[in-house]
Image: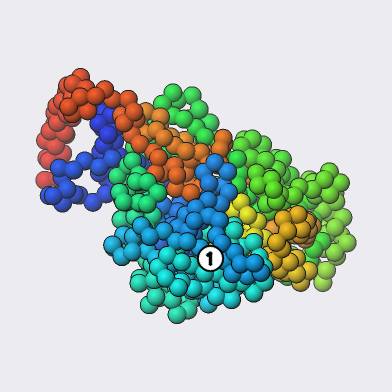
Amino acid sequence: MYGRRLMAVVLTLAVVLGVAGGAAAQEATPSPSPSEKTTLKTTLIIGTTKDMISANPFGTAGDSEWETFVLDYDFLFNFSPQTLEATSGLASYPPDVSADGLTWTFDIRSDVAWSDGVPLTAHDIAFTYNVIWKNQIGAFTPYLGDPISFSAPNDTTFVWKMKTPSTSPLAPPNIFIVPEHIWKEHSPSRTTLKEFKNFPMVSSGPFHLADWQSGQYWSLDANPAYWNGAPHVDQIVFRVYDNQEALALGLKNGEVAAAEGLSPSIFNTLQDDPNITTNVAPGTAWDDLAFNFKGSADPSLQDLNVRQAVHYAIDKQALVDRVYLGYATVGASVVPPVFAQWAWQPTSSETIDHDPEKAKSLLDQAGYKDTNGDGFRETPSGDPWSLQLLGITDYGESVGEAKLIGGWMNDVGIRTSVKTVNQSKAIELWYNQNFDMYVWGWATDPDPTAVLSAFTEAQCGWWSDGCWSDPAYESLFAQQASATDVAKRQELVTQMQQMLYEQSPDIVLTYPGDLQAYRNDMFTGYVKSPQPRGDIFFGFNNDSARSIRPVVASTSASSSSGIPLWIWIVVGLVIAIVGVVMFTRGKGNRHERE
């Protein structure tokens, strides 16, 4: 306990000196070279339990990766930190459009460079978009509508030609612009694109991925020449913790300045600490129970009655209360209510609510009955019937939700076993279509195109959970993609949400709040997006990361050194104490080593 308190004092003083992260990050970052030892870095350390799996934006789907890419790369357009509406990014917003609505012309900035010094131009944007469309990279093609071509007649002009009029060029596409001179040799096919490690990385954003030790940390250095404003910290380090308890302790002790993806129970333990500010961002994501329709999936999942029976068996309010401790709302549509322009919610008469008897009746109608009296149902042909449900250990509250859902399914006679896996294994099973059901989730865009595309046939092997498809849904998706009238598009988007709710290829369980916290005595300047309530990191833009600065920057008295004399005196005393402690421990341990 004494050692822990002493370390907390040292860390706090390091923060006051503006080098907090540098002191705390010594364990996570390589030893500096002789030329670097005289330069003190201001380092923001963010704790998380979600490791980064890949540095390739064309080959990953995790939110740790997404946050890293948002800091490393630029978009064609940015998301406004206030409203998440489109605003200027690499291109000025809005673009020019021809009278027939088919040709869109974008003015591209001329003051952006890649981290290796090569200028970023319109040719990089055209290359990125062409690679995506040519190779049908399903994670990104929904943003592109039905294009004819992407071209760059010069360094500062990007031209996007469409086959039919569309509003696609007006919505901020979540497409990270990559450097042509690096990626061109890896772009002949989807396979080569996804296999490229992309580390070391060449990037253009406010930060640059500089170091990465899987399972431990990844670090990003600031880009002092960033076109949209240089960051106020020199480095961001994401430190990976094995569990939520260790993450919370790291925040309390000052090992990390902020924590992301906290569980509700751990989040509650931080509420009364005066040095910690907590933040509950409204859910822009949803947890879901996804069914598989391909590969090794049980054929019973093709039966709508079975899926709806599972839907009726689930008590979503209990998930909100018992798993999320109230930090979530009951889920329904794949477009969360926070995106009010597009979201649909069922009326009371349309709601599929917790009704075990209704679930049993649907199963009876489908021919799944308990013919041997053991409490579990057999298939219509009389064969044993069982399903497996995956809970993901390092994704939110997946395991807690899966255990409750498995119990409710057993209660209505569906023999269900719950198996736990981590996200790396879950991604492998997902891509290979080797599962029955899992509890996972999706973060969604303010524009509904991307999330609605996840249920199209083209997304099988990309964003689709279980490769469900329906011709009527495909038709609606095509119509909304080409709709130029907002009211008409809203009507089509509503119909699609209703269809997904009724067909239940995925059951939207909850809209979890994003639970985050940070030490208010170390750094300040966090930006919530959207405002007034929103994420302070792991969101849609890099504004918060660029705005965060050490507390000392706004509170220190002016002097020749910028640091009050009394702080130097205290620092000297602490260093002396630490030196004595280290010397004493060194003598005691040296005997043991020998």
On the rendered image, what quadrant is the C terminus found in? top left
Residue in the picture at 39% in, 71% down: 180
For residue 145, what is the image quadrant? bottom right
SS for dot 1: strand
Q: Eyeballing the image, is 466 above or below 43?
A: below
Q: How is the image coloured?
A: rainbow
Q: Eyeballing the image, is 457 above or below 352?
A: below
On the rendered image, what quadrant is the N terminus found in? top left
Q: Which residue is mark 1?
A: 105
Residue in the picture at 44% in, 23% down: 274
Residue in the picture at 85% in, 65% down: 367
Q: Nearer the viewer, residue 396 or 361?
A: 396
Q: Is residue 579 visible?
A: yes
Residue 30 horizontal/vertical position (percent) = 23, 51
For this orientation, the residue located farthest to the bottom is: 188
Residue in the picture at 41% in, 52% down: 71
Q: Counting other residues with Cα less than 10 Å from the Cα at mark 1, is it few (<14), some (14-19), or many (20 or more)?
A: some
Residue 487 horizontal/vertical position (percent) = 76, 54
Residue 520 horizontal/vertical position (percent) = 40, 29
For residue 197, what is the image quadrant? bottom left
Q: Eyeballing the image, is 476 above or below 36?
A: below
Position of 359 with respect to 151 (left or right) is: right
Position of 305 with respect to 183 (left or right) is: right
Residue 345 horizontal/vertical position (percent) = 76, 47
Position of 481 with respect to 309 (left or right) is: left
Q: Eyeballing the image, is 150 above or below 341?
A: below
Q: Nearer the viewer, residue 523 or 172?
A: 172
For this orientation, the residue located farthest to the front is: 99
Residue type highlighted by circle 1: Thr
Q: Is residue 394 visible?
A: no
Q: Nearer the viewer, residue 485 or 563?
A: 485
